[in-house]
Image: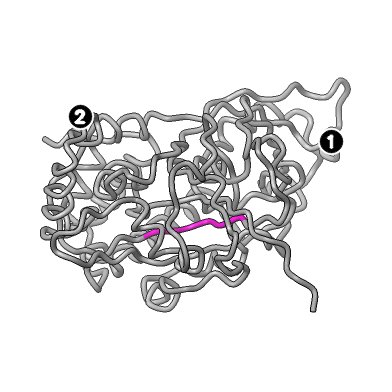
Amino acid sequence: MDRGTEAQKYIWEGAIPLQIHLHESEVTTLPPPPPALILAPRIGYLPLLVPLIKPFFSSTLPPGVDTVWFDYKGLPLKWYIPTGVLFDLLCAEPERPWNLTVHFRGYPGNILTPCEGEESIKWSFINSLKEAAYIIIGNCKNVMNMSQSDQVELWCSVMNGNLEAYLRISSKLKLGPGGDEFSVKLNSSSSLKSRQSALETDTTGPVKTGRIPVRLYVWSVNEDFDDLEDAPHIDNWDKISYINRPVEIHGEDKYFTLRDAVKTLLPEFFAEKSLSDDEISMPEVGDERGLPSEDANSMRSAEEAGETMCQRVESCCPSDNAEIKLLRIQGIEPKLEVPFAWVVNNLMNPEHFLHICVYIKVPEPVAM
């Protein structure tokens, strides 16, 4: 039985300490309730924490129907983005515990798509899985033909962080992180570099295509900063560009690295020079950002994937003097020489997407 790699186990067991405060407008008692302290799974979703959080605040809530949502420093958080990705995107300088505010009233429907609890999250996950299947093998029949029991078990494995159960069920979908030729090519080429580390040993078996589903979150800033604690605060989702684009692998003998993958995803920043690892700041942990609200719809169906997976970044600037300040995947800031096969095989989310958060310093536009 496949028990997963050591890196996969770390990802699935990973959790973010949260300190959750009830918004002051919903406090009806004195003294106000203390914040709730809980651990949020990296691969989970914030609304799934509501059953754990509500008992801390139920006695002080005003009358009304619950419409739960979260914010970070006033920014409503997209419920369909995995918690770990939000943290990597929105906390440039690691914040532990991560201080969030929960609201049980006043849902911001102009910013967030409706969420009806666990069912909404489950179907968002399944639709993302369909989208990934469409990208990898050209259709989503394997996902659509899942038995009801397998579908339930797959979702429960994600909610409960059960990697073994997840691998057992997901293997039936025959998706995998890459194709037979892709996996063999990358794993064999990586051995040429003879890396005596976990990067060589933590690989999964071969699978079926050379197209890797990627969700890329790009934060472009004009202000320069050397320390992440000086990075500007994100107060609007419009500041984040969201790319839903596959990485396609070409070349039989090429040693394909994370740098090569980033070049294919952000060609506008690599038009004139290659990115070196010395150009990336390497602090200890994750950042958080999200996607524009209209992009939530790209997760709704596999059919839409055909249109959205090649979506371009609209707010990125030309490559002249642009600098990648930070690149994070699953809270890790990997070196760009890392074999992309290792990244795919070990850091992919359960819905078969690789989520990459990037901070880019771009020059100020010149007024004409």
Residue 35's spot in the image, x, y percent? 71, 24
Give the residue type at disc 2: Gln
Q: Would residue 343 be found to the left or right of residue 201 on screen?
A: right
202 up-or-down from 294: above or below: above
Label 1's element? helix
- Mark nearer the viewer, 1 or 2: 2
Residue closer to the observer: 54 or 4? 4
**Residue plotted at (22% across, 68% down):** 137
Q: Which residue is mark 2?
A: 196
Tag 1: Cα neighbours inside 10 Å, few (<14), some, or many (≥20)? few
Residue 66's spot in the image, x, y percent? 69, 46
Q: Would residue 65 be found to the left or right of residue 115 on screen?
A: right
Q: Would residue 85 be found to the left or right of residue 309 on screen?
A: right
Could you tell me if the residues under marks 1 and 2 are in contact, i.e. CB atoms within 8 Å? no
Residue 140's spot in the image, x, y percent? 26, 69
Span highlighted in magenta in the image: 214-219
The stretch drawn in magenta includes residue 218: yes
How many numbered markers are drawn? 2
Give the residue type at disc 1: Glu
The stretch drawn in magenta includes residue 62: no
**Residue plotted at (48% across, 52% down):** 121
Identify the mark at residue 122; answer none if there is no mark: none
Identify the mark at residue 24; answer none if there is no mark: 1
Dot placed on the residue nearer the N-terminal end, 1 or 2: 1
The reply to whether residue 299 is visible in this rendering is no
Residue closer to the observer: 153 or 238? 238
Of all residues, the one furthest to the right in this rendering is 30
Q: Answer with the quarter of the image where residue 19 lies.
A: top right
Residue 28's spot in the image, x, y percent? 86, 32
